[in-house]
Image: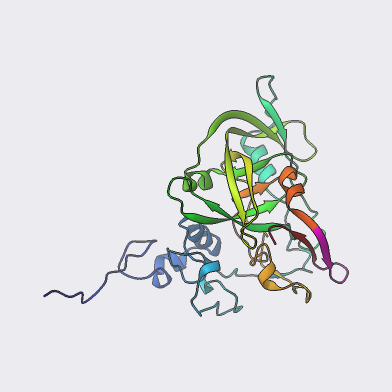
Amino acid sequence: MYKVVATLVACAFCTLNHKLFNCKKFSKESVDARREFVQTHRLCFNCFGSDHSVYQCTASTRCRLCRKKHHSLLHPKNPKSASDPKSVTADESVKEAERVKPNLPLTSGEQSIPQVVTCVSNMLGQVLLATALVKVECPKTKSTFFLRSLLDQGSQASFITESAVQMLALKRTPGASLVSGLGSDQATLASKSFVFIKIQSRLDPSFTITVKAHVLSRLTTFLPSSKVVVQVLPALPSNMLADPTFDMPNKIDLLLGAEVYSQILMEGIIRGPSNSMVAQRTRLG
């Protein structure tokens, strides 16, 4: 008779025999690098488990620094207050694109899809953009995932990251498109294909919508740019938020444009005191 006397645990970061939160190499990485690794490998942000997301995590452990539902190794080093005038940065995706492909001319053979990117002045406090977690399914394996999406009613199209397309094994349709930023008639990004992705509301399973999304290698930097200290409106139940961790920097895999925004918008706005949060009711939360 044989019995298991020990189970070897291979670290996802260095492959040695220990758990990720005990990995010295992982702990030496920057917070952003650690968050990026956990996000890329689809690990739970709370316990580093590989078979569930943070929203499905049943572990009772919480961050030792702020008591929120994420691992202490993923806690931002310098969380900034919403009133901190230095805590805001403009979305850098346009700036980065201009460094990579400056002033690409539009050609008659390519479709121009203007994209309005929300920018804010660094003289103001941190601006929270509307984000939502949406449920998606891999057509081949029927596995379900949660993608963090940015709701941008100023964008004329929807976009998805290359990594999300590969994870979901979505079928691509070739189609070259040039993307321009706010106040520019010159293209700064190019998409070579698009996909159709069916998204489902995390809070209302009866609501689904199929979105045509153009594929880009990257949509934006982590949003928000830093940890934001906010007070959730008393009239707003925390379990009804479209993105329960809206105040934590994280990756954006999906940008939902104006066409989608008009279909998810519902009546109902909750306002707080001046210069505080404003909550808009949608089909996503």
Please tell me whether residue 87 is drawn above or below residue 92 in the rendered image. Answer: below
Residue 134 position within the rendered picture, expressed as x and y whole percent measured from the top left: 61, 56
State the residue at coordinates (55%, 61%): 32
State the residue at coordinates (63%, 33%): 101
Q: Residue furthest right?
A: 274
Q: Is residue 276 magenta?
A: yes
Which is more toward the observer, 180 or 69?
Answer: 69
Quarter of the C terminus within the rendering: bottom right
Which is more toward the observer, 176 or 227?
Answer: 176
Please tell me whether residue 198 is drawn above or below residue 44 in the rendered image. Answer: above
Please tell me whether residue 137 is drawn above or below residue 98 in the rendered image. Answer: below
**Magenta range:** 267-277
Residue 135 position within the rendered picture, expressed as x and y whole percent measured from the top left: 57, 56
Quarter of the N terminus within the rendering: bottom left
Q: Residue furthest top?
A: 108
Residue 37 position within the rendered picture, expressed as x and y whole percent measured from the top left: 48, 58
Q: Residue furthest front?
A: 206
Which corner quadrant of the image does residue 247 belong to?
A: bottom right
Rendered image coloring scheme: rainbow
State the residue at coordinates (77%, 41%): 182
